[in-house]
Image (tube, helix red, strand yellow):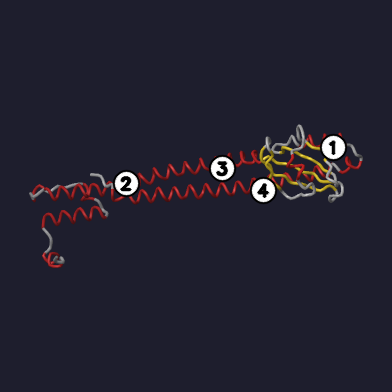
Amino acid sequence: MKIQKLFQRTRFGIFAIFGGIVLSTSALCLYTVDTQLSAEYEINSKNIAKTVADSSVDILLNRDMATLQSLVDQFVEIQGIRYIYITSETGEYLAHTFVPGIPEEILRSDHRNTEPVERELPGLGNFIEVGSPILAGVAGTVHVGMDLDVVALKITRAIGQQVYLVSIILVIGVLASIWLVNLAAKPLGELLAYAVELARDNDEQSLPDREVLARDDEVGHLARLFLYVARNGPRPDALEATPQG
């Protein structure tokens, strides 16, 4: 005889606990990885912008625009960098990597701004742009655009690996909990079956003798108590103590 209803809430509670652990862990991983990778890419973009700014000082002083364009073309080959453009102190575009031309949103932006800015460029995607001044802004500004789609892909991969691990732990934990619950339910089922046999058997000599009687736990104690009551009946003082309706 199976004991199902008694452990329904227990199983539901176990599922809820493991589900809450998975959701909270996944949310924490998502937030942590997203924050750390985004911050890392932003720092890398700033470092690249500063490197370009430092490397372009002599080039700008010599007004060698071809070398300046070659410089920005080299840096744009780095993974994650989608565009670089350099403006003069007056806002003139000295070099850029846009093909075929500079987007309107870039043209409308403040060329002196060096703070991180998120941009959505039609036909290109979503970017985070950082800037670095050249000679404290006297010689112009370098702007670097980092592709957020690349950042999102790396975040997805990093989170996916952690979610796989958490999901495996969830499945193993749920299966283990079911096994443990069934392990606890089995002796109770044996006790229930034994009590039913005692109730059906009116012949004192043929009262069943089961392995459940040999158990050294609460189930065994209850089984022996049921057997004692079946053979001897309830004690008179127990009957007197029973409240009357």
Compute the Cα span from label 3 to label 1. 39 Å
Q: Which mark is residue 159?
A: 3
Q: Amino acid at mark 1?
A: Leu
Q: Judging from the image, what secondary structure is the residue with disc 2 in? A: helix
* Residue 118 x/y as whole percent: 68, 46
Label located before the other in sequence (2 or 3): 3
Label located before the other in sequence (1 or 4): 4
Q: Judging from the image, what secondary structure is the residue with disc 1 in? A: helix
Residue at numbered disc 4: 39
Q: Between tags 2 and 3, which lies in front?
A: 3
Label located before the other in sequence (4 or 2): 4
Residue at numbered disc 2: 183
Label located before the other in sequence (4 or 3): 4
* Residue 84 x/y as whole percent: 77, 39
Residue at numbered disc 1: 68
- Give me the residue at 40% from left, 44% from top: 174
* Residue 173 x/y as whole percent: 42, 45
Q: Amino acid at mark 3?
A: Ile
Name the residue nearer the viewer: 77 or 183: 77
- Give me the residue at 35% from left, 51% from top: 10
Left or right of 137, for residue 36: left
Compute the Cα span from label 2 to label 1. 74 Å
Compute the Cα span from label 2 to label 3. 35 Å
Label located before the other in sequence (2 or 1): 1
